[in-house]
Amino acid sequence: DYVNFKRIVNHILDRVEFTMASEDADKHYEIKRDFTSREIYVDIDQDRMTQVIDNLLNNAIKYSPDGGTITVSIRDNHQSVIFSVRDEGIGISQADMEHLFERFYRVDKARSREQGGSGLGLAISKEVVELHGGNIWVESVEGEGSVFNFELPYTSFDDIEEEWI
Ligand code: ATP
Ligand code: MG
């Protein structure tokens, strides 16, 4: 179905911020939203794409120190939309980046076990993004942080009122 992409992402980020604000949240961070002013409608399975975005956000939180900034951006690339999550976390080595999207691949087994999770998040994310005709990739510098991106084809309905969709 066609859905308003920025609206969905805002919704997810509001929920993540709400969870962080709770008393027993163990990490605090700032989320910056850097979105194109264009209305972006994407033909997606909303539940599946929400799972992808949740995993990228949870990773950014999990693999960053307390108090960092996470920047979520939505950029218009004419025939496609680029979604990115940038963190100021531990980063990933070049060698590990090549395997990150494989099932059960986790960088530091011991540390990752402490963090919880199964190492399936990125493999599933890749599968879902590719099923939508898109692609997913990572850029990272060890010790500085990472940027996870995915690109999806989209149709722009510039002249149509949001309510009509
Ligand atoms: P799951 O998502 O199944 O709960 P997970 O988060 O360990 O577990 P993935 O999301 O597939 O699994 O991530 C695979 C591995 O990639 C992680 O264990 C971690 O080592 C590394 N990784 C993922 N995101 C980041 C990030 N933002 N910064 C640093 N390392 C990351
Ligand atoms: Mg994960």
Image (spheres, rainbow, N blue to C red):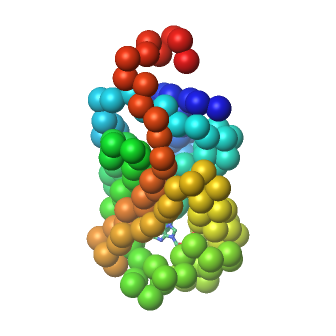
Q: Quadrant of the C terminus?
A: top right
| Quadrant location, ligand no. 1 | bottom right
**Measured from the top left, where is residue 28 in percent x and y?**
43, 48
**Measured from the top left, where is residue 131 in percent x and y?**
64, 56
Foreground of the two, 12 or 163:
163
108 left or right, relative to 48 = left
Q: Which residue is drawn at 53% across and 12% down?
A: 164
Can residue 91 be seen here? The reply is: yes
**Measured from the top left, where is residue 113 in percent x and y?**
65, 75
In the image, farthest residue toward the bottom: 95
**Measured from the top left, where is residue 56 in percent x and y?**
52, 56
Q: Is residue 51 above or below residue 1?
A: below
Q: Is residue 112 above or below residue 42?
A: below
Foreground of the two, 28 or 121:
121
Q: Which residue is drawn at 48% across and 47% down?
A: 153
Can residue 27 be seen here? The reply is: no
Q: Residue at x 58, y 37 (%)?
A: 43
Report the number of numbered marks: 0
Q: Which residue is drawn at 65% across and 32% down?
A: 1
